[in-house]
Amino acid sequence: MSISFGSARLLRYVVVSASKFSETAVINVSESEFTFRAIDPSRTALLIITIPRESATAFNINGSEQLVVSLDDLSKVFRSAERDDMVTLSWTQSTLSVSFERRGFTRTFTLPLATPVEEIPEIEIEYPNTYVLSPLLLYDCITGLEDVGDVLRVEGREDELRLKAESELGEAEVVLSKERGGIEESDVREPGFSVSYSMEFVTNIKPIVKVAEKLTLKTGSELPLYVEFLSHGLLAKYYVAPRAD
């Protein structure tokens, strides 16, 4: 069985980002979709990408299967991918093969499958606050704040979102607003919320943020940060648990 994608770009960044906080990825395939999940050992961060059948260039799947693969090995393979490579994943009971094709030239890597791990839970949260942001603008915000402190505080109201980096030495702040175009859309039912997250887990997703076509951020007091990325029909989701202040 196998599945092919027209571009390795987003999947490459998903795999590399996931390898920063998790040792393994769980891949679930069915006749309708391909889902990649990675969670860190402390269950602070969870990254999911779902690729529906119609978004794949080839989808040769019969039945359902679960594959577990080392992210250290898989990230090394995907780091060799070029942005215009077509990628094909195929597998047996014991191996996963990753092929990159560009201009008629194919490179194939075969990895052993890992031992099954504990099931990664589904997350269902009704968020009170939703912001649609420019991906490149959020990328610039994270880049500007990541070296200031190890805590990211998120605060907001209907027309404004504040991102603050905090440390013992001080803080820095970026304000995104509807007035200046930083916020494209918003739905805020909990104005005045304030919640903090570990900066290291937020910066893990910078590569995905940079290539996203649409980005939605959801949050709320004492709730995980949720960032949703859409790119060429592919949907990626990232959760970060709140810090205990």
Image (tube, rainbow, N blue to C red):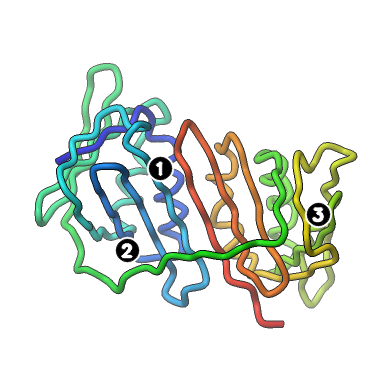
Residue on which disc 2 sits: 24
Quadrant of the drawing holding the N terminus: top left
Instruction: Name which residue type carries label 1.
Output: Arg
Q: Which of 81 and 190 is in front in this view?
A: 190
Measured along the vertical axis of the image, is residue 44 above or below residue 107?
below
Instruction: Name which residue type carries label 2.
Output: Thr
Q: Is residue 129 left or right of residue 99?
A: right
Measured along the vertical axis of the image, is residue 38 above or below residue 177?
below
How many numbered discs sit on the rendered protein? 3
Q: Residue at x 35, y 66 (%)?
A: 23
Residue 185 x %, y %: 75, 42
Q: In this view, does 57 lie to the left or right of 48?
A: left
Q: Are dots 2 and 1 in contact, CB under 8 Å?
A: no
Q: Which of 98 and 116 is in front in this view?
A: 116
Per the image, label 2 sits on a secondary structure element best described as strand
Q: Nearer the viewer, residue 105 or 195?
A: 195
Instruction: Name which residue type carries label 3.
Output: Leu
Quadrant of the drawing holding the C terminus: bottom right
Measured along the vertical axis of the image, is residue 239 above or below residue 61?
below
Q: Quick one: label 3, few (<14), some, or many (20+) residues within 10 Å?
A: many
Residue on which disc 3 sits: 161
Q: Nearest to the eye among marks 3 and 1: give it.
A: 3
Residue 131 x %, y %: 72, 49
Per the image, label 1 sits on a secondary structure element best described as helix
Q: Are dots 3 and 2 in contact, CB under 8 Å?
A: no
User: Cα distance, mark 3 to mark 2?
Assistant: 34 Å
Residue on which disc 1 sits: 12
User: Cα distance, mark 3 to mark 1?
Assistant: 30 Å
Q: In this view, does 188 lie to the left or right of 79?
A: right
Give the mark, 3 or 1, whose residue is nearer the N terminus: 1
